[in-house]
Image (cartoon, helix red, strand yellow):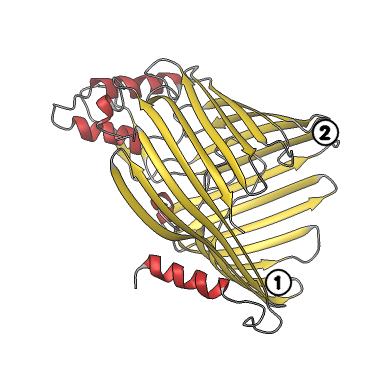
Amino acid sequence: MTARRHIFVLALLLAGLTESARPEGWKTEADASVYAYAGSTQPHAHSVLNPDNRIAGIARSRVDTEVRIGLRAESDSLRLSLRPILSLYQASGDTGQEAYLSQWQLRWRTSPTSQLAVGRDLLTWGPAQFRSPSNPFYFDSGRSNPMRELSGVDVLKFSWTPDVLHSVQLVRLTGSGHRQPWLASRDDGWLLKADWRNDGRAAGLAIVHSPERAPFYGAHVQYSPSDAWLLYGEVGSGSRDQALKPPRNPEQPFEVQAESPRHTRQLLGASYSLDNGHSLSLEYLHSGDGYSRDALRAYFKHAAAASLSAPGGAQTLGLALTAAPPLLGRDYLHLVWQNSLLDEQGYWRLMLTRSFTDNSLQASGYAEIPASSRLSVFALGTLPAGHRQSEFAALIGYSLTLGIKLALP
């Protein structure tokens, strides 16, 4: 039986627990939404990193249909939840389909203060919008793209909550989840997560030990001095799977280390809520594993010197795209203006990011407007600005996605 059929059978079994068939003492819930959207992306024909789109293979057009399902069954001591995703897509003439479990969990409440769980869990935390330095699994937590469906990490987890102020989790990392190969080096590792919250204040500490990686240490704090203000910060120290270094001699290939040196990332942020429900957020991020201004120029200079017709040219550009830091620069400013998610007229979000390393910009916006109680239309657009040898303008000229979301009864 294929994975797709396994998921389909599991979904039917859980959804089929009606009032008459449900075991005594169990409560069940189910929900599902259909997302249908089409996107257009304009790759730069003369991109230094992706000439004629022959390295990255960015799809100029793409049509997706996704069914996102939530299934839950719960008794006094046990809780089973499943998040199956069924997907069909067509990208630049190619078609495909897949079915997978984005998240799932079987949880046993062993006592009023402790729980044991197994499953595929979404290990996200912290208040940051742009990036999450305190998180070694989801540096990009997806908050800049409201359409994105994050997949969890395979875990065994013990949770202890002695009171409303404190919680501790000890997590065994058993797998990287669905299509997340960059997390494979965390397999067979351990996560210790401790949290504290009290009267407008919160703090958390994360320690990750992996056999194949240097330990990761992360922390996040937040403070609300009033109902309108939220002040927060995150910090993380760790390494990456690979470190790409541009050589001083353009005729030499990129230097790739199996593991990067230890680096630190810090983020400071503030959010202010207006009386009309709108909020403004401003964040500053320093990414210690990014390139300095001179190193970034050397990175693009070396990529520009690579020719696809020359031996090793495609390999050089491939490394430039896959082994570089997730953010090429070191210092960023991120601005978010959004309305309330509870606004009956719809939700919108405007974002602007500037890299101080090369002065490139990226503007993006998301809007979702209800057409009925179950149907809504949405749009997501991204517009970079900068020269071709800058981070945000290196690959694409724009991207635009339009779609509908239907909540099934």
Q: Tell me the amino acid under the disc marked 2.
A: Ala
- Is residue 259 shown left or right of residue 55? right
Q: Tell me the amino acid under the disc marked 1.
A: Ser
Across and down, in percent, residue 367 comes to 60, 33
Identify the image quadrant of residue 92. top left
Across and down, in percent, residue 343 comes to 74, 38
Dot 1 lies on which element?
strand
- Is residue 226 shown left or right of residue 161? right
Tag 2 near tag 1, CB within 8 Å: no
Q: Which residue is mark 2?
A: 228
Using the rendered image of the protein, determine whether residue 244 is visible from the camera's viewpoint.
no
Dot 2 lies on which element?
loop
Identify the image quadrant of residue 126. top right
Specify the quadrant that holds the N terminus: bottom left
Judged by depth in the image, the label closer to the viewer, 2 or 1, is 2
Q: Judge whether 373 appears above or below 194 on screen.
A: above
Distance between mark 2 and mark 1 Cα atoms = 34 Å
Q: Judge whether 107 appears above or below 288 on screen.
A: below
Of the two numbered discs 2 and 1 on the same chain, state the one appearing first in sequence.
1
User: Foreground residue, 394 or 258?
Assistant: 394
Specify the quadrant that holds the C terminus: bottom right
Q: Which residue is mark 1?
A: 114
Across and down, in percent, residue 360 comes to 48, 19
User: Foreground residue, 20 or 72?
Assistant: 20
Across and down, in percent, residue 139 comes to 53, 43
